[in-house]
């Protein structure tokens, strides 16, 4: 078959002069930077149209579906965000009810707002030892559906940003009994399909719609993702319509070609690439699990706190047995060892390993953590930080007073954060990354939330969502 990325390569050399968009006209001299202008085109003859695919793009989507075993696949150049918005919009009528994990990405909350949905939340279990979210269990889903018979769709995140995998097959059996679709945000699990070292993909476990970010864990450019349709519970035509609404009308051919090239590479060489990657990953995990002060989250979490499985490509380094906090460890790794982590939290740092990592790169991280652990083991235990709760989770249960859309569109006023306790929020608050709301419009602000906010700011964490970027005030629903 013709490959989109190969055709772009050929077209860049064929000598055609472009009297069409984009405005750079494939001329690298138009800016003083090195961009792949020669392959950046619009919907011209022979290159199909993402919003009405009939040729080379349709072929790429069919191959993605074949590669993952889904019935139909849609390319997204607006990341998992557009895919999640489309999946929710196509699965539940406007004003309908959705059952969703409280630790969903903000894109799901935006779908709730845009479609004026009524959410019911399932809070994941908490891993007490580390203070991170555990899994969502089928029994909790079953109970919620029995208590709320008007729910039209269920959405869970698996794996989570921390690598926690829920029992998707069990949840899928529950939703199938109620004949409602299950959407799985598997944005961080696009690599699962390519090695038994990792958990099974939701595509194979009974989910109806599955969203995956290629760019997160596969060799593909930022902003590339796919939406899989795995059953007939959701209309493919409806998904196509909403993907056309939530994606740019001028989709990047460079991003689509990146996905096409990624799939071609995985089809041809994926098995060998992942064999090498998992071998190197397994070796450093074995060494890192021996560290005592900087602890690596390991697979022994499985079976506790609703954790059905664990993605071992997520490397979580906990600092609770050291004199460091997450921000301090992050800065040491960056400034001294020149290693840039994915994120830092109050008491841990996250590194994401992928098939793109070299053995040398993984070993650099391993040796850096071992050296920091060695230093910490020499320090006096009394120097340990005392200002971080041992059992801490940012996602504390909140009381929902009104709907998200009602709160965001009601008259509002700005209030100092300390004076907002007991009032109803009109804004989101996220810890970023990963962009999971710790406060949602319509929820009642509590003293514990304000206390947590101050703790986050004292620790230098990145809080987003509030219109006041200083985080000193918050918009509340007016009288």
Image (tube, rainbow, N blue to C red):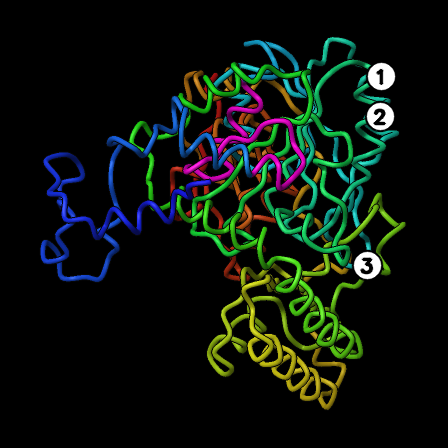
On the image, the x and y values in percent for residue 431 come to: 54, 48
Q: CA distance from mark 3 to mark 1?
A: 35 Å
Read off the residue under disc 1: 177
5 in relation to 333, above or below: above
Read off the residue under disc 2: 173
Q: Is residue 413 visible?
A: no
Q: CA distance from mark 2 to mark 3?
A: 30 Å
Q: Which mark is residue 129?
A: 3
What predominant SS class does the magenta segment belong to? helix
Mark 3 or mark 1, which has the lower sequence index? 3
Q: Which residues are magenta?
A: 64-89
Q: CA distance from mark 1 to mark 2?
A: 6 Å
On the image, the x and y values in percent for residue 316 come to: 68, 63
On the image, the x and y values in percent for residue 197 come to: 76, 58
| Label 2–label 3 contact, CB within 8 A | no
Q: Callout 1 environment at 10 Å: few (<14), some (14 to 19), or many (20+)?
A: few
Secondary element type, mark 1? helix
Q: Is residue 269 visible?
A: yes
Q: Residue at x 51, y 24 (%)?
A: 86
| Label 1–label 2 contact, CB within 8 A | yes
């Amino acid at each position: 078959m013709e490959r989109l990325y190969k055709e772009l390569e050929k077209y860049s050399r064929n000598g055609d002069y472009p009297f069409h968009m984009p405005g750079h006209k494939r001329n690298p001299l138009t800016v003083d930077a090195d961009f792949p202008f020669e392959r950046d085109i619009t919907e011209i003859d022979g290159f199909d149209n993402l919003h009405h695919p009939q040729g080379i793009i349709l072929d790429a989507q069919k191959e993605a579906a074949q590669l993952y075993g889904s019935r139909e696949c849609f390319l997204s150049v607006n990341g998992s965000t557009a895919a999640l918005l489309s999946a929710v919009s196509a699965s539940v009528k406007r004003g309908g009810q959705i059952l969703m994990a409280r630790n969903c990405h903000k894109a799901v909350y935006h779908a709730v707002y845009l479609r004026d949905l009524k959410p019911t939340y399932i809070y994941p279990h908490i891993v007490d030892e580390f203070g991170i979210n555990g899994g969502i269990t089928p029994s909790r889903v079953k109970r919620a559906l029995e208590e709320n018979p008007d729910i039209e769709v269920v959405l869970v995140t698996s794996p989570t940003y921390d690598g926690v995998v829920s029992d998707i097959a069990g949840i899928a059996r529950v939703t199938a009994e109620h004949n409602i679709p299950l959407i799985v945000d598997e944005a961080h699990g696009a690599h699962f399909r390519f090695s038994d070292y990792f958990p099974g993909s939701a595509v194979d476990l009974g989910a109806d719609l599955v969203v995956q970010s290629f760019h997160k864990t596969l060799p593909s450019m930022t902003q590339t993702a796919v939406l899989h349709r795995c059953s007939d519970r959701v209309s493919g035509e409806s998904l196509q319509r909403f993907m056309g609404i939530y994606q740019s009308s001028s989709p990047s051919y460079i991003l689509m070609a990146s996905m096409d090239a990624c799939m071609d590479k995985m089809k041809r060489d994926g098995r060998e690439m992942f064999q090498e990657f998992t071998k190197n990953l397994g070796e450093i995990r074995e060494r890192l699990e021996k560290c005592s002060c900087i602890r690596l989250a390991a697979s022994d979490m499985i079976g506790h706190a609703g954790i059905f499985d664990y993605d071992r490509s997520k490397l979580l380094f906990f600092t609770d047995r050291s004199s460091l906090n997450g921000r301090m460890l992050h800065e040491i790794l960056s400034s001294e060892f020149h290693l840039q982590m994915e994120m830092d939290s109050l008491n841990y740092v996250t590194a994401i390993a992928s098939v793109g990592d070299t053995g040398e790169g993984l070993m650099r991280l391993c040796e850096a953590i071992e050296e920091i652990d060695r230093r910490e083991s020499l320090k006096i235990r009394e120097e340990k930080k005392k200002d971080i709760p041992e059992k801490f989770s940012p996602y504390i249960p909140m009381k929902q007073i009104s709907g998200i859309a009602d709160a965001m569109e009601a008259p509002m006023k700005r209030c100092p954060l300390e004076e907002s306790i007991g009032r109803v929020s009109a804004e989101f608050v996220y810890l970023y990354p990963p962009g999971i709301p710790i406060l949602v419009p319509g929820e009642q602000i509590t003293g514990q939330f304000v206390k947590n906010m101050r703790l986050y700011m004292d620790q230098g964490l990145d809080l987003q969502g509030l219109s006041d970027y200083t985080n000193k005030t918050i918009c509340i629903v007016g009288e």
